[in-house]
Image: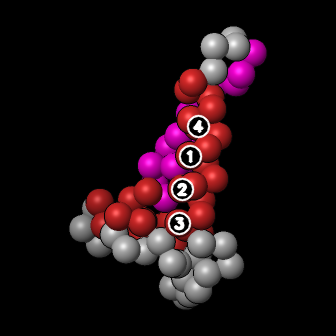
């Protein structure tokens, strides 16, 4: 991340899909034993921000670009 090498090892767009499936299952479950994972929901939102900024083709390490954009960096 320091060198700004955001070549994909794992695409951010796939993370939105994968994390979304888990968060959706969690939210729709009526079973009280299903753990609540607020970190997963936040991660999904951050990766979705990357996809919205057309950065879904970058690697997951490019997640740093989301707070940078939010802070005008």
Q: Which structural element holds mark 4?
A: helix
Q: Kindly check if marks 3 and 2 are in contact, taking CB atoms under 8 A apart as contact.
A: yes
Circle 2 crowding by C-alpha within 10 Å: few under 14, some 14–19, many from 20: many
Q: Is residue 73 above or below residue 66?
A: below
Distance between mark 2 and mark 4 Cα atoms = 10 Å
Which mark, by number, is residue 47? Answer: none
Q: Is tag 1's residue or tag 3's residue first in the polypeptide sequence?
A: 3
Q: Say whether marks 1 and 4 touch (CB < 8 Å).
A: yes
**For residue 13, which numbered disc appears in the image?**
3
Query: On the image, numbered disc 4 is attached to which residue?
Result: 23
Left or right of residue 71, residue 56 in this image: right
* Residue 72 in picture, x, y percent from top left: 24, 68
The residues colored magenta run 33-47
| 13 lies above or below 25 | below
Q: CA distance from mark 1 to mark 3?
A: 11 Å
Instruction: Indicate which disc, 2 or 4, sits on the residue closer to the N terminus.
Output: 2
Q: Which mark is residue 20?
A: 1
From the top left corner, tell me how far across and down residue 13 is, in percent. Answer: 53, 66
**In this orientation, which residue lies closer to the viewer: 72 or 41?**
41
Residue 57 x/y as whole percent: 51, 78
Q: Tag on residue 16?
A: 2
Q: CA distance from mark 3 to mark 2?
A: 5 Å
């Amino acid at each position: 991340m320091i060198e700004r090498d955001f070549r994909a090892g794992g695409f951010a767009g796939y993370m939105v899909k994968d994390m979304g499936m888990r968060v959706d299952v969690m939210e729709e479950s009526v079973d009280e034993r299903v753990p609540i994972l607020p970190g997963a929901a936040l991660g999904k939102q951050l990766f979705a921000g990357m996809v919205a900024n057309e950065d879904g083709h970058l690697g997951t390490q490019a997640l740093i670009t989301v707070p940078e954009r939010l802070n005008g960096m």
